[in-house]
Image: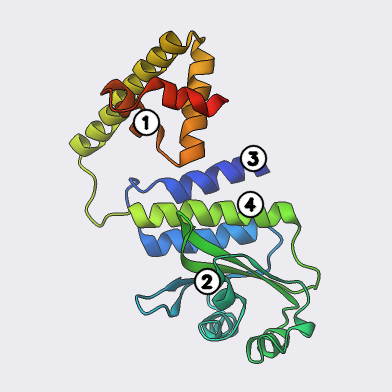
Amino acid sequence: MTREEQLTKAFVGLADTLADGFDPVVLLDRLAGHCIDLTGADAVGVTMATTRGDLRIIAVAPHQQETLTDLVRLQAADGPARDCYRTRRPVNATDLSGDADDWPEFAPRARQAGYRAAHALPLRVNHHAIGAVTLLLTAPGGLPTTDLRLAQALADVAAVALVHWSPDPARPMDILTQAQAAVAAKATVEMAQGMLAEYGRLDPAQAMDALHAYCCRDGYRLTEVAQSLVRRTLAPETVLAALR
């Protein structure tokens, strides 16, 4: 299997919440496994926050390593995962021999277990952290930026799939309804695009650029703005001003 095929399989497997047998625990096991297969990490731990803000271990890879499990669990109170969850930002420890002051329990235990570097990436949805993914390496220096970006992308997809998971299987009618909603939304956007093009004497591409610019500037959803234009509750000139 090529790397491109591995990436495709990984992202589809993490995102397909409607697949038969989809399970949140299996999802995070997959996330840990993909991080090892697709980056240079030697071990991975996934922790999630409880309602009290504590981190609880959910998955580790490789499996059945008691030392690794204990090490990941330790980060609930001390370690890069805890700092990552609190700040909602990645934490990079490229040489754990110099981090004893920051993590007096985790750093020595990690070195004793044979790990010399660690990264912690936020498990997040809409900028809200729900946990952290820890990548451990047996050599100092840390992972390349490209591998960290890939691991973060995998974590982001898994987090979104996790919060959209439902224990009740989706009914065919539910799936059809969602699909039709997307079709209706597209039709509304096209109508708003035509209105802007006519009002501002623009070509369709420029009208769409105006819609996107207005949404990005003020943080609105595209379909929300389109609906407001069609309903005449938002003036076309207000949207077109975003191009200036």
Residue drawn at point x = 55 percent, y = 53 percent: 154
- Mark closest to the chain's N terminus, 3 or 2: 3
Front label number (2 vs 4): 2
Q: Which residue is mark 1?
A: 225
Front label number (3 vs 2): 2
Verify CB contact (< 8 Å) between mark 3 and mark 4.
Answer: no
Tell me residue 211's x, y (percent). 46, 26
Amino acid under disc 4: Leu
Q: Which residue is mark 2?
A: 85
Front label number (3 vs 4): 4
- Residue 51 visible somewhere in the drawing: yes
Toward which corner of the image does residue 125 lie, by quadrant? bottom left
Q: What is the CA distance from the residue labelled 4 to the residue labelled 1?
A: 32 Å
Q: What is the CA distance from the residue labelled 3 to the residue labelled 4?
A: 12 Å
* SS of the residue under disc 2: helix
- Mark closest to the chain's N terminus, 2 or 1: 2
Left or right of 149 on screen, residue 86: left
Front label number (4 vs 1): 1
